[in-house]
Image: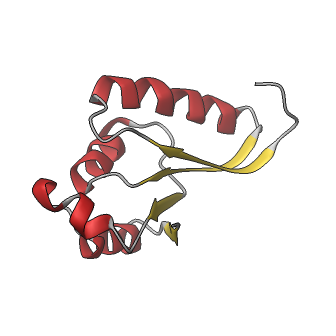
Amino acid sequence: MNFKNADSLILAFEKKISSREIKRIWTEAENLKSAGKVQNIGVADMTIEQIRDLFDWCSITPDMLQICPSTYDEDFREKKSTIKDIMTFGYEHHLRITTHK
């Protein structure tokens, strides 16, 4: 990408994305942050399992987690991931939690 810098980069993945693809994309976000192109990196609308998996292997942890509170619990009910899970994890890891529509 050709830009000077950005304050935040929030990655939103397809629901059925593989862990391998998340790792490939997240590594690119880490590279942008390391190069000073992006100040904060984060993820949107991931299940608690995906977030825990990300934290297990990433070199740079997310600065923020973003969720859509009006649909999150319904969207991820089958994955047994709730807003409460995300909020608890974010609090425990000192992450900024943001919302979107």
Q: Nearer the viewer, residue 25 or 16?
A: 16
Asked if residue 30 lies left or right of residue 59, the reply is right
**Percent x, y of residue 13:** 42, 40
> Camera-side residue: 22 or 95?
22
Number of marks: 0
Give x and y (percent) for residue 44.
45, 53
Vertical side of 33 occupied by 69: above or below:
below
Residue at image x 48%, y 33%? Answer: 26
* Vertical order, 30 against 95 (above or below): above
The color scheme shown is secondary structure
Q: Position of residue 7 (x, y in %)?
A: 75, 53
Vertical side of 48 occupied by 20: above or below: above
When the figure is inspected, residue 36 is found, relative to residue 71, above or below; the finding is: above
Image coords of residue 67 (percent x, y): 43, 64
| Residue 71 shown left or right of residue 41 in the figure | left
* Point 26% across, 76% down: residue: 84
- Name the quarter where the N terminus is drawn: top right
* Residue at the image position 55 percent from the left and 57 percent from the top: 63
Residue drawn at point x = 51 percent, y = 67 percent: 101
